[in-house]
Image (cartoon, grey):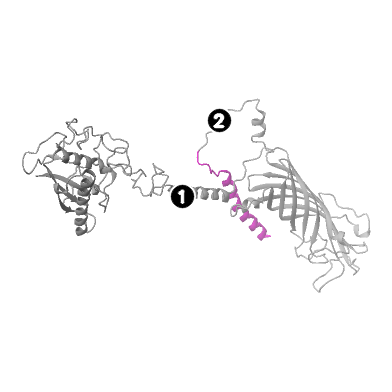
Amino acid sequence: MKSYSTLFTIIITLILKHGFCQENLNIDHYPIEINKETPKKNNVENIIFSNNIFNNIEFKLMFGATQFYGDIKQLDFRPSYSRFFDEIKPAYELSIQKKINPLISLKTSYITGKFGGIKSEQIGDNYITYDPYNFYENNGEYFVTSFNELDFQVLINLSHVNSLFSNINLYNFDIYLKNGVGLNVFNSLNRNFNGNYIYSYGYKEGVYLQNNNFSKKSFLNSPKDIVYVLGLNSSYTLNDKFKIHFDITKRKSNTDYWDSHSNNANNDFFNYYSFGFSYKILNKEMNSWRTPMKGLEKEIQLTTANIRWLSDDSDNDGVSDAFDKELNTPIGVSVDGSGSALDIDMDNVPDYLDEDPFSTIGAIVDNKGVEFDSDNDGIPDIKDLENNTAPGSIVNKYGVSVSIINNSGDNNSYLPSIYFESGSFFINNSNLKRLSTVAMILKNNDKIRLMVIGNTDQYGDADYNKELAKKRALSVINYLSKNFKIDKNRFEYISNGEEKPLSLEVSSTDFPRIKTLSEVNRRVDFKIIK
């Protein structure tokens, strides 16, 4: 019996820990504030039902049959078919069950009925009929025991315990493991197959003198025995009030007197197989069981969704949608850390749409990113101190008209530069206005000639860059000659390659959003010569 008690103690200790912690489990992400109000005197529900002792109590009625295992039993496992009802007896159970939490319930049961057994002959040398009066007639024996039992049980909801390890949903089914102890009051009578008396417990003196109308002792004077209870109960919920129950319970005796056949083996027990229903008085259920595995699965799914969300990049610009301020930048467009298309000159026209990506900071530009230049002298209005110069006038960097004074020309004169894509000598549309300005100056000043100077950025081989700068200069000369009918003899060219970068000379205040001004160095400059 120590093994039963040890098992019972270990199970209850482990499950109570999970059971009571479950009620305090908080899986909500945000706190919920509850306005506390003093219950009104006429609020019957608050007064009666809030903490009523009858909450979560079920009254259960069970009907079933017993099967005895002990000294007097014909077969080891199944009953004898020839005398089936001598070994299978009826019993009834009335119980009250209280749910403590979603895992643990307590139960008190009263069970009454009979159990019995037969043995048609002595089998084996170690079997001896208990026959203190020498009444055994050697043709078989049987016994019948009437009993009343009161026991206390602890039930563990295995369906909820299973959810600690699995997410299998049993829906309206619950399976309970039950363990407990009880007190059994019994009256046992052992007889020969023909009905003649052999021995008894719990019957009045002199009973051996009769074979009929045996008289039991009073309830208080009848023999009593400690019972150990172990079993399984399954229930199916029909509605808020009723449940159907199926039950199998083993009740183990602490002595060897149940079959009136004491061999001091202490091995008497009987199984009780029963079916019944329960009724719940009050329907104010405690908080529903929240399956930890489902909660964990939900958190994993949410975390996975968050990870996927953080890794999504709709426009494939290398910036996650979670941080991308522009979710629809075209493929291949350079973006900053926020996913916004680069806008070097900060004119609110992204570089991939900007025909003049180096417009003056703060200048007013059109929808193509080109600064307004009212007099078309190549100096934007924001820098032009003389914004009404005649078309084709040579101006300085402030837009003020200048004249050619000596053979070397006016070093302060200004002609716009032409810019190129990396590794290219193709003239794109963003340079057309600048080339038009240069052409107009040449047409209105037919005595001047221009030195066309090709440049590259620092990337690539020096010899390659030297050749690329030359091709850029020739591309500009050919464009002016072909499209504006400018005589090629009015041009000379040189190639600087990567040797004279302007990025070191440009103030960071002019282009604060970029660290490397490679774009500025990919250019063709003009210098007025005689």
Give the SS element for disc 2.
loop
Q: Is residue 17 visible?
A: no
Label 1 neighbour load within 10 Å: few <14, some 14-19, many 20+ = few
Which residue does the numbered mark 1 point to in the structure image?
Answer: 307
Residue 133, picture quadrant: bottom right
Location of residue 414 by image quarter: top left
Determine whether, in the image, residue 208 is placed left or right of residue 7. Answer: right
- The part of the image, by quadrant, that contains residue 67 is bottom right
Q: Nearer the viewer, residue 330 or 316?
A: 330
Residue highlighted by disc 2: 36
**The residue tagged with tag 1: helix, strand or loop?**
helix
Q: Main secondary structure of the magenta part?
A: helix
Magenta-drawn stretch contains 354: no
Residue at 64% of width from left, 58% of height from top?
7
Q: Is residue 304 above or below residue 57?
A: below
Nearer the observer, 132 or 331: 331
Tell me the magenta residue range. 1-30
Question: Is there a contact, CB below 8 Å, between mark 1 and mark 2?
Answer: no
Q: Nearer the viewer, residue 346 or 140?
A: 346
Horizontal and vertical percent position of residue 354: 30, 41
Q: Is residue 447 left or right of residue 373?
A: left
x and y, in percent, of residue 290 in the image: 59, 46
Rendered location of residue 208, percent (x, y) = 91, 60
Q: Which mark is residue 392?
A: none
